[in-house]
Image (cartoon, grey):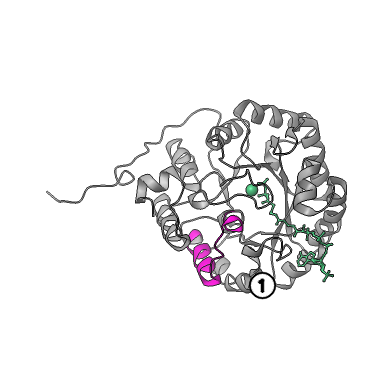
Amino acid sequence: MTDHEPTVLELGLPAPVRSDGLPARVRIHEVGPRDGLQNESVALPVEVKAEFIARLAGAGLRTIEATSFVHPKWVPQLADAEELFPRLAGLPGEYPGLRLPVLVPNERGLDRALALGATDIAVFASATQTFAQRNLNRSVAESLEMFAPVVRRATEAGVAVRGYLSMCFGDPWEGPVPTDQVVAVGQALLEQGCTELSLGDTIGTGTPGQVEALLAAFAGAGIGPELLAVHFHDTYGQALANTLTALRCGVSVVDASAGGLGGCPYAKSATGNLATEDLLWMLQGLGIETGVDLAALAATSQWLAGRLGRPSPSRAVRALVGSG
Ligand code: HMG
Ligand code: MG
């Protein structure tokens, strides 16, 4: 007899049971260091951010959005991008296949990212005029004009470009967002040369029927799920249900943030992203491969919660390792 009480993971929970119509493998696009930390009131020291990203890579994540090359006054929490990014230079050698995308809004941001050797960037558009204005200081059309040379130059330099599209379901100023409006901006980003389009539910108001309808509308415009990723914020507890719906529609790239960190400083009603651990619990239970070690990730989120001075909002983190 031993006093050791096995953890749920040691006991083989969640027991994997496959369900038809789901992908065999999901690539998690981890956004904690960018989407998560951009919205924390505490700006973490650069060495803590670097350790966070190294620990995420150590847990098996292979796409980790590291930071943003936006205007430092707009997002002061990520103003240390020039200091942080070089500290990550050794990680891709240590973890083969690791990608470290960064957010870039304009040519100035691209110059900064290229100067540091970034190999993956993301531009970020809005499906609504109000959010485009608030987040980028431009209309939707003007922001697309701003992205065009960024996508062109990045592609010429061999840098992969993801396009984000915010406010795909609801907008805190405009209400429900018409599907054709979302598809039109998404299509424009792909036509510019983005190789992946991430559909953002920035304020988390979307529900599964809406997800299905939007993905069907994209399919109707000739944009299949192989080009799409989903990016759900969990404000109303819908992120996991919405993700499962997207997986059933053929999407296999899912954005999530370790510990459920996150939000958007220019949309106050946005809260954290879908927690990566909550997502992993579901994917593991469905027998879907991710390559990520849930125990190591939950320990990382608990460690970060200690640095941030607040418990992780992730249900799985709390259940697995306490509230931090
Ligand atoms: P602006 O004020 O219109 O900029 O801001 P500008 O082009 O007029 O330039 C003004 C000055 O800023 C110039 O300097 C530029 O050089 C400088 P000056 O000549 O006056 O000395 N500047 C820069 N400096 C450093 N880096 C730059 C840069 N750009 C200009 N990149 C801008 C326009 C786009 C820059 C601004 O609106 C901005 O930075 N916005 C970023 C907002 C942001 O990061 N939001 C959060 C990310 S989006 C998100 O979270 C949603 C997502 O998760 C998906 C979802 O959930 O839906 C992705
Ligand atoms: Mg977001």
The residue depicted at 76 percent of the width and 50 percent of the height is 134
Where on the picture, by quarter, is residue 173? Answer: top right
Q: Is residue 194 visible?
A: no
Q: Is-magenta flag for residue 49? A: yes
Q: What amino acid is labelled 1 in the image? A: Glu
Q: Main secondary structure of the magenta part?
A: helix
Q: Is residue 111 visible?
A: yes
Task: Report the span colored magenta.
Answer: 36-56
Disc 1 element: helix
Q: Which residue is mark 1?
A: 82
- Residue at the spot x=42%, y=60% of the render? 306
Front residue of 169 and 155: 169
Q: Position of residue 318 (x, y in %)?
A: 39, 47
Mark 1 residue's CB less than 8 Å from ligand 1 = no
Q: Where, by quadrant of the figure, is residue 216 drawn? A: top right
Dot 1, how many residues are within 10 Å of its Cα: few (below 14), some (14-19), or many (20+)? some
